[in-house]
Image (cartoon, grey):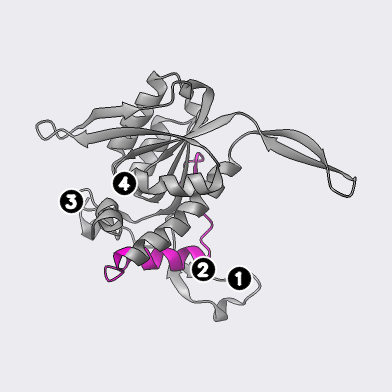
Amino acid sequence: MSSESHPEAPSQSVGPEYQPATQKPKATVSTVIPQSNVTILPQTSQLIALLTMIRDKNTGRADFIFYSNRIIRLLVEEGLNHLPTVEHSITTPVGQTYSGVKFEGKICGVSIMRAGESMEEGLRNCCRSVRIGKILIQRDEETSKPKLYYDKLPEDIADRWVMLLDPMLATGGSALMAVDVLKSRGVPEDHILFLNLIASPEGAKNFAERFPKLRVVTAFVDQGLDEKNYIVPGLGDFGDRFYTM
């Protein structure tokens, strides 16, 4: 897809609901896609401000890490909302009964190396002592297709709910292969949640249709892919900006 064929980016007023539209700034917001198993974070002024910071080419590495971590925390919190719970009543310190819930089942994170490792801290901050697995997938230079080079996963991963971590979803090749790896280890498709910061419409659509029982949680769906399959407007190479630049 060439840059000239990208649809116009959607724009809307962002800010608290109680403010009139005339008092809210206009901003580019996420593209809406029809796949029901894709959840896009609410396009709040806070989220758009954080995304603006990490998209800016002039944002230094320290600020890029700080603001990325804030978005990752929002993604993990939303991901946890999709895990199953059961009724659980407790007694408060004043002797009253409170009818609540608790999570059902164990979870783990699996990062697609290397950029996905940037999301591990956000998961650990929300889930104490969470197990983390890793998958390394790179493009084969001869075939231009993704190739599995390494994986290290918890032995009991088939009995866990898996949060698959990768900040960018472009064509989806690496993420699709990662899900195939998880399924080959016995993880049910509907026990996988894929968390990412920015997706392309093409990647999100392909991913959601290939695995209809899996849920994708993303902060933003961008306009599309350019002729080099880079997400536009995007933010550049996430791993480079997080780890080296």
- Residue 140 point in image, percent of width and height: 15, 33
User: Which is more toward the observer, 62 or 237?
Assistant: 62
The disc, 2 or 1, on the residue closer to the chain's N-terminal end is 1
Q: In the displayed structure, does residue 126 sit left or right of residue 227?
A: right
Q: Which residue is mark 1?
A: 16
The residue under label 2 is 45
Question: What whole-number distance in Å separates the C-alpha atoms at marks 3 and 1?
Answer: 38 Å
Q: Which residue is mark 4?
A: 115
Kindly identify the amino acid type of the residue bearing the numbered disc 4.
Ala
* Front residue of this view, candidates 90 and 158: 90
For the residues labelled 2 and 1, say whether their Cβ atoms are less than 8 Å apart. yes
What residue do we see at 57% from left, 30% from top? 106
Spatial CA span between label 2 and label 1: 8 Å
Mark 3 or 2: the one toward you: 2
Quarter of the image for residue 91 reads: top right
Residue tagged 3 = 227
Q: Amino acid at mark 3?
A: Glu
- Would you say residue 39 sits in the magenta stretch? yes
Q: Residues within 10 Å of mark 1 (few under 14, many from 20)?
A: few
Residue 39 shows up from this direction: no
Q: Is residue 53 above or below residue 87?
A: below
Q: Is residue 27 above or below residue 66?
A: below
Q: Residue 99, located in which quarter of the rendered image?
A: top right
Coordinates of residue 5 in the picture (x, y in percent)? 25, 56
Residue displayed at 66% across by 73% down = 18
Q: Is residue 15 visible?
A: yes
